[in-house]
Amino acid sequence: MTELRKAVERYWAAADARDWTTFADTLAAEVVYDLPQTRERIRGKDAFLRFNVEYPGDWRVRTERVVADPDSGQVVTWLRVGVGAEEMQAVSFFTGDGDGRIAEITDFWPEPYEPPAGREHLVERY
């Protein structure tokens, strides 16, 4: 297991536990957080920590899958995030700083939608 993978696993466990000290310890000082769907970017550990501490609602996060590529220094997670009765899925891409900390995070929050008509005979809905 790579150092970055360990950091990402600690990051999500700390986020779910609201352990902001451990969460901050996983981050590089100049971490960059991108949300392409809303075109938002947060720069720096202090701003990103505050963003998470102040995020509204009693959300919970469960990691479904972690994929780490030690050759590229990249880790990807598939998450299920619950806020009350609502559940969302997210995919997050992480890049390390070479010292076992998280330097870049890109989050994608896909919205569920109904598929187009005409392929019902090919798919199974769940």
Image (spheres, helix red, strand yellow):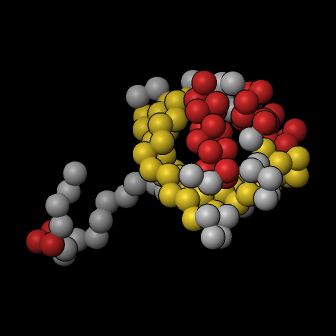
Q: Quadrant of residue 104?
A: bottom right
Q: Is residue 82 left or right of residue 14?
A: left
- Decide: is 67 above or below 46: below
Q: Is residue 91 above or below residue 45?
A: below
Residue 79 locus on image (x, y percent): 48, 46
* Left or right, residue 50 beside residue 115: right
- Residue nearest the observer in this picture, 90 or 27: 27
Which residue is found at the position 11% from the left and 71% from the top?
121
Residue lying furthest front in this view?
1
Q: Is residue 107 visible?
A: no
Seen at 58% across and 42% down, the residue is 9
Quick one: which residue is furthest to the bottom in this view?
118
Left or right of residue 97, residue 29 in this image: right
Q: Position of residue 110 (x, y in %)?
A: 49, 56
Q: Position of residue 125 (x, y in %)?
A: 20, 57
- Residue 64 appears in the picture as rendered: yes
Picture quadrant where residue 75 is located: bottom right
- Residue 81 screen position, x and y as percent: 49, 38
- The residue positioned 43% from the left and 34% from the top of the image is 86
Q: Residue at x 67, y 44 (%)?
A: 7
